[in-house]
Amino acid sequence: MALDFFGFKIVRTDKEIKAEERKSINSIVPPLDTEGSVVSSGGYFGTSYSLEFSTTNENLLINKYREVALQAEVESAVDEIVNEAISTDGQEAPVSIDLQKVKYSDDIKDSIREEFTTILSLLNFDKNSYEIFRRWYVDGRIYYYIAIDTNSPKDGIQQLSYMDPRRVKRIKEVNREKNPRGVEVISDITEFYVYNEHQNLKLPVDSVASVTSGLVDDKNNIVVLSYLHKAIKPLNQLRMLEDATVIYRLSRAPERRIFYIDVGNLPKVKAEQYVNDIMNKYRNKIVYDSETGEVRDDKKTQTMTEDFWLPRREGGRGTEIGTLPGGMNLGELTDVQYFQRKLYRSLHVPVARLDDAATFNTGKSTEINREEIKFFKFVQRLRTRFSVIFSDLLRKQLILKEIITPDEWETELKHLIFYDFRGESHFMEYNESEIISRRMEVAKQAIDMGKGYYSQKYIRQNFLKQTDQDMEQIDIDNGLVNPEVERETETGIEGGGTPPEEETPVETPETPEEEQ
């Protein structure tokens, strides 16, 4: 059995084949997928899903997410999130690779770092990191087509092309068969991408690098959701309430006059005609046209913001002019502010950050509110999820250049490689410094109590939280321990004796004959 990787065959060992067969045969349900793959049965032309239907739904969602991101409040919140997650200064890369836990030689680690730099260069991540992260956050997914030289695949990835997520769909074919007990189990799972630009193109799964938000529709686990999905409803409510407030202010703001016209004993028709004549005689409606800048006389049907003319029969108080007061609570914005805060909370952004009058406190960690802590953890989750695309591209690059094998990546590298983003939160810096200061204060108090209570090693281990390696390195740096002597002690005779090769030779006493 061989692995099809970019059209090339990578032979697997019998042990790997048996492990994979044993894993698939014992399973009766497909593994949980957060990529939003469409699960189908049968061959490519005999699938049981409707690609057009599911793609149309996702296209509508992506268009909606992009429309939501253009709103002023949401755009400000998204900008705050992306700026917190990605920090660039034009000189240093916004992300670096951490290989401290990788137990490989320094030469291999240097090769991995070099290939990771190549990946960042192909993405142009130094200059476009903000746009790339924002595009992934808004759309909820991002896809890159991987181009290699088929004549020389060992040269690695040559180009990365951005793919419109509205044109790409990941498909998972699940083939089932009955075991000897008559239970249907999964025999094989085939995954590929379908790219629909002008026609459906079937692409191998390794020819596309992707990362999604990890959020899927709970109903069918097919449609990938964006982080902006929760903001759609509060944004619509906010817009409707703002429009209602503006309409109310326009209709209730001005004071209107009420004219009671004495019509005497005139019949109804003549009374209405008389009132209209009075209206046309004394009313001159001046209208300002904001488009052309003209002022014109516009006599039209009476609106809510104009005066009221009411007839009054004989026996009344005669003609009278009164006033109808305007709205009294036009400055009430409590409802609007409520839905605005609700919108910000749906995006996990602290409300204080979006208030121009508020100042961000960078003092002690105890003075930072809980929303800032939650926001920092949310950004950390976003960074961890977005790092999946780095791992995906790095895996393909290292395998193509034959630096590692697929089995080495899965067993030795996949879970030991981490990515460090620049621009950590100020809260973490202040929090760490305060923790260190507090530990030093407690350690000083323990030392002042005397030797009868705590030993120096106990204080360093439990109060200062120093490991054995930390204590050893600190003693060496302070000159308290000679590293050569320590190394000889570890390899020498137990009890602190000198190694055999450095023992002084024993001189034999001279015989009496030699003395004579």
Image (tube, grey):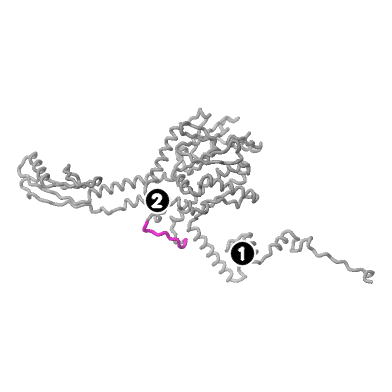
Left or right? Give the position of 74 relative to 270.
right
Label 2: how many residues lie within 10 Å, few (<14), some (14-19) or many (20+)? some
On the image, the x and y values in percent for residue 43 come to 53, 29
Question: Which residue appears at 36% of the width and 58% of the height?
Answer: 357
On the image, the x and y values in percent for residue 19 come to 63, 38
Question: Which residue appears at 73% of the width and 58% of the height?
Answer: 491
Residue where numbered disc 1 is placed: 458
For residue 368, what is the image quadrant? bottom left
- Residue toward you, 295 or 112: 295
Residue 76, label in figure: 2
Q: Based on the picture, tell me whether residue 357 belongs to the magenta stretch.
A: yes
Question: Which residue appears at 63% of the width and 33% of the height?
Answer: 1
For residue 57, what is the image quadrant? top left
Type of amino acid under label 1: Tyr
Q: Is residue 483 above or below residue 327?
A: below
**How many marks do you count on the picture?**
2
Residue 475, label in figure: none
First to last magenta residue range: 356-365
Tell us which disc is closer to us: 1 or 2: 2
